[in-house]
Image (cartoon, rainbow, N blue to C red):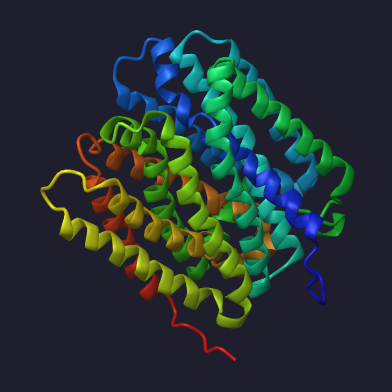
Amino acid sequence: MQNQPVLKLEFVAIMALLMSLVALSIDGILPALAVIGNDLGVTDTKDHQLLITMIFLGLGFGQLIFGPLSDSYGRKPMIYVGFLVFAVASIICVNTNSYEVLIAGRILQGIGLASPRTLSIAMIRDSYEGDYMAKVMSFIVMIFILIPIIAPTLGQFLMLAYNWQAIFNVQLGLGILVIFWFWKRQPETLALSNRIPFRTATLISGFKEFFKHKQAVAFTLIAGFITGSFMVYLSTSQYIFEVQYDLGDDFPLIFASLAVGVGFATYLNGVYVVRIGMKRIALVSLAAYMLSSLLYVVLFFNQVNPPLWVLLTFFALQFTAVGFLFGNLRALAMQPIGHIAGVGAAINGFISTVMGVLIAHIIGAYVSTTVWPLFLGFTGCGFVSMVIFLLNKPLERTI
């Protein structure tokens, strides 16, 4: 642990790019969901969502594998193994003519990408703590958010210029570049003296230790509800804008414009989190998230979709709040479990991701003719999250 925290820009960039491999693999194929479905004979358009939700399912379970292993063998070796799994899965996705095999490949991609996603967070926890960790996380998420701005446009270009398989090929190529930079420049953050010999019981004992910490459990559950509501947006956004609003080729631009709000919020969070405190920022953001969702539910109950600018305004409010929430919720959950950072990050990610997949599947099934069910789901997730937050211990005083 650093005695005097120093923000190392190269460390921030590498960690952000490792985490961004997940976003690239998700957001890059959003414009191609319908084309992939048509090419592989999918008749129900709602099945297109599986290409998004199933990679998250793989992410959830992959974290349980790589987290404990990284506590025993180090962060860097496990990131290499995970990327190898992702590379094999990408090759499967490119070369299949079966939608079922493609879904299996997406699950395997998620398992592999769980390694850089989870272990980058563990490496941050190895190096920083407290509000400063939240500050670092916010700057990393700010870079991470650039991917949803770029990836859909890149995916659409590759699909139109070549084919949908090119999206997977380019993602793999960019991933190789990131891993090469990581290999050359990033030192191992887990000292040999802090490693735990791997045993099957390690994960079981990790779960027991994790659930001893009320704060870790509470903020992991909140992260699960927020992740789920955001995941259902990711999996239905292409359908909403291209089918319900008939916007077609404008989808990447709209998706990118909303991502800008998340990026701006994460930047502001990085600037002010040490001064204000991550709990206070998270509480205010959660309240804004819940109330803006509730307002939409009340205003447009039993009505058709509002004009596009109205919908985008509400989405912007939602995702600005999400920008303040993501980094802080993860940092709050990890704060009391630094002594089991690898296993702790794995359990935190597993619970929040699997929760997210279930929530996205349930809510997504009702997004058919209007967006109203989506905001009803946002409201429910926000309300339950607020209850959990308020039942957790009171906010500490600021200095």
User: Is 332 displayed left or right of 248 in the figure?
Assistant: right
| Residue pictured at 46% horizontal, 57% vertical | 223
Dividing the picture into quarters, in which one does residue 108 lie? top right
| Residue pictured at 27% horizontal, 52% vertical | 375
Count of all numbered marks drawn on residues in the image: 0
In front: 53, or 216? 53
Dividing the picture into quarters, in which one does residue 266 lie? bottom right
Residue 254 in sight here: yes
Q: Is residue 161 above or below residue 121?
A: above
Q: Position of residue 194 (x, y in %)?
A: 80, 59
Residue 68 in sight here: no
| Residue pictured at 38% horizontal, 61% vertical | 317
Which residue lies most toward the right here? 184
Dividing the picture into quarters, in which one does residue 337 lie? bottom right
* Picture quarter with the N terminus: bottom right
Which residue lies most toward the left here? 302
Q: Position of residue 244 (x, y in %)?
A: 26, 34
User: Is 231 displayed left or right of 92 in the figure?
Assistant: left
Q: Position of residue 172 (x, y in %)?
A: 68, 27
Q: Is residue 290 above or below residue 199?
A: below
* Picture quarter with the C terminus: bottom right
| Residue pictured at 50% horizontal, 50% vertical | 259
Q: Position of residue 143 (x, y in %)?
A: 65, 53
Q: Is residue 130 above or below residue 77?
A: below
